[in-house]
Amino acid sequence: MKVAIGQRIQDGPWGGGNQFVRSLAETLRNRGDDVRFDLADADIDIIVLTDPRELSPSVSFGAGGILRYLLFRNPRALVVHRINECDERKGTRRMNSLLRRANYCADHTIFIATWLRNLSLWRRTTPDTVILNGADKNIFNRTFFRRWDGLEPLRLVTHHWGGNRMKGFDVYESIDQMLADEKWKGRIEFTYIGNLPAGFSFTNTKYLPPMQGSLLARELSSHHAYITASINEPAGMHHVEGAMCGLPLLYRRSGALPEYCEGFGISFDATDFEACLEQLIEQYDALEVKMPAYPHTAERSCENYLTLFDKLIKSRENILTPQCLWRGVWLLRRNQIPL
């Protein structure tokens, strides 16, 4: 099988999408499949659309390039659109529209969370599947994790590539202020790893620049619990990496976070955060023993992608029968017009 993925792998810290592409490409190649990051070859079987923003430096092709490829080079390629974004996560206004238009070229849509799938913005013209994200267990694991003894301060940590305030900075700022409060001073510590909003700085929080790979895993493992306060998170990778390192989760009841975190931590919202933090402290031992069972590994996620790809190839002839005559490429496929 030859698979083209529409995103170039970037060196250094680059967010969860980059990690997904790296893991998927490695899994495909380990199985003996051919992986490309462009549409240069005329015999591609599966095209994976990862981002509709064709001008992004990491994007190698978008929906327009895919349609041109289908029309003029290879109408038998199948297109899978992985949707991992939405306007709701950053308060933007054009991402949903970009995703909706780009989705017209897809034979199958993958959502990285049920919450994202259930947003009302999608036009269901093709079949879809939910496949959850996963972190590389060879990097993010419990090797260096040391559970909290209940005596020293509870060390909380979070990390984000994006510096948008909706990543949870209302809560992170509150924690920063709590660290100076007599009630919490000496009971908790907080580390933030990653990019910050423009002009923002912490006063009492330990700040570290973006990290990746084993360096990030080692730093996460030096803490006791992981917090994510992200608002309308489509799925994310940060909390998955924290959980894989063994850290019980303190997560916001928002977006896809409950789907990824439930059963492995305590949920909160902006109105009950301190009470939920107290609950995490009280239930820490019971939560920590559950963490080895956290299921969201890159291996599991990528195997689900490969299973879907195999199923699509097996059903290719049926898929290429048009369901929607409004798209020119469907007409081209139906009539098997030679190129």
Image: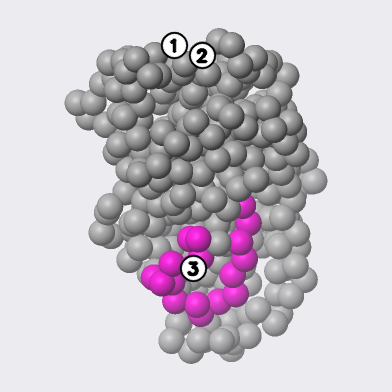
Please name the amino acid that badge 1 sits on.
Gly
Tell me the tag on residue 153: 2
- Pick the residue in front: 180 or 200: 180
Residue occupied by mark 1 = 186
Relative to 185, 110 lies left or right: right
Stretch of the chain drawn in magenta: 115-133
Quarter of the figure that contains the N terminus: bottom right
Relative to 21, 30 lies left or right: right
- Pick the residue in front: 146 or 129: 146
Please name the amino acid that badge 2 sits on.
Pro
Quarter of the figure that contains the C terminus: bottom right
Residue occupied by mark 3 = 118
Q: CA distance from mark 2 to mark 3?
A: 40 Å
Residue 177 in sight here? yes
- Label 3 or label 1, whichever lies nearer to me, is 1
Q: Residue at x 48, y 32 (%)?
A: 277
- Measured as percent of width and height from the top left, residue 58 is found at 43, 41
Please name the amino acid that badge 3 sits on.
Asn
Q: Residue at x 58, y 21 (%)?
A: 224
